[in-house]
Image: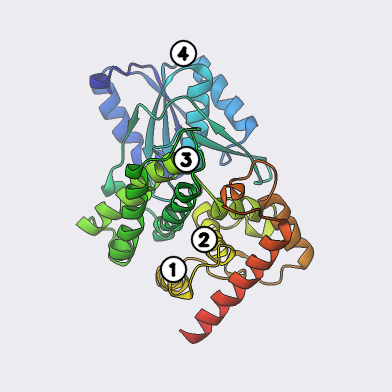
Amino acid sequence: MCALGIQGPALIVAGKSAAGLLSQTWRTSLDETGIAHAVHAFGGECSVAEIGRVKAAAQQAQARVIVGAGGGKALDTARAVAADLGLAFVSCPTVASSDAPCSALSVVYTEEGVVHEYRIFGRNPDLVLVDTQVIARSPPRLLVAGMGDALATWFEAKTCFDGNVRNMRGGASTQSAVSLAELCYRTLLNDGADALRAVQMQVVTPSLERLVEANTLLSGLGFESSGLAAAHAIHNGLTAAPATHAFFHGEKVAFGVLVQLVLEGKPSSLVHQVLEFSTEMGLPVTLADIGLGDASSDTLNQVAARGTAKGETIHNEPFEVSPGMVFDAIRAADATGRAWKGNC
Ligand SMILES: [Zn+2]
């Protein structure tokens, strides 16, 4: 950190398992470099209240840098605090479960776990530190969830690029961003299965290294520099149904990808490629897979209404999207997923 001009004291916002895994490492490495540090145990939700608590802890510790360690929500909370207080931010993901680590965006939830707002800050992290030895010891389901998040990147980026819409920073998309998004998708298809086996065995392999790069860096650059479309809006809609709260961001996003492909009328060959990948990895392809097997029409209407709310990225699609269209696409994606599973 010193080489980058980052100075202490540091406040580390750490999830439970991150603290368990890394406390000793922090003590040794930060003490060695003379950086004082305090640890704030992350409360579990990136909410307005938790951001407030971390802010108070940062002020008490007179922190000059905020380090986020853990999953996406811990990182998003730490990022929001660093931005609000004008401090440096170090992102230290201990799982590759989403593309949060490299971005300048925090997704803020209500205490009940419903998406409340996106906060986009002026700068990306000062440092992103990923240790694949640590990722290899994380639960395989979290790596798979990260693949679900990364699965959306290419499809959403392409939709935004083709539609010439503004990216997450309000700028134009670039060829390089779309190329990285495509590389992200190709890496998932090529390395996903091997990387999953590596994490199941808790070992580091070249496939795992590439896959972690896809989940973390390629997906992060791809979505931020090209944009989001229907898949993430569907995810946000799904959070309105409490039954989905037991599922990770990337798991809901993976189902959102299928809904986007149906909504866009993509050829069945492409839908089947995604279904094949998702079922092989264990990502959700049906409503039942995300806790909505017996969801009523009312529930799905609420999901569709939330997913098409004003300002949602579903409006980056190149046609007008109504709640009714989303309701139908969800039902159709679910039926396609069930048929696919039935034939497997
Ligand atoms: Zn995401």
Q: Is residue 208 above or below residue 309?
A: below
- Picture coordinates of residue 281, whole percent (x, y): 40, 68
For the point 44% across and 52% down, the residue is 158
Asked whether 253 or 327 is in front, the reply is 327
- Specify the farthest residue to the left: 206
Q: Earlier in the sequence, mark 3 or mark 2?
A: 3
Check disc 3 and report the residue beneath it.
Answer: 15
Task: Categorize mark 2 by other alpha carbons within 10 Å: few (<14), some (14-19), many (20+).
Answer: many
Distance in Å between CA atoms under marks 4 and 3: 21 Å
Q: Is residue 64 above or below residue 235?
A: above
Q: Earlier in the sequence, mark 3 or mark 1?
A: 3
Check disc 4 and report the residue beneath it.
Answer: 62
Distance in Å between CA atoms under marks 3 and 1: 32 Å
Asked whether 244 or 335 is in front, the reply is 335
- Image position of 219 (left or right of 242): left
Mark drawn on residue 260: none
Q: Amino acid at mark 1?
A: Val
The N terminus, quarter of image: top left
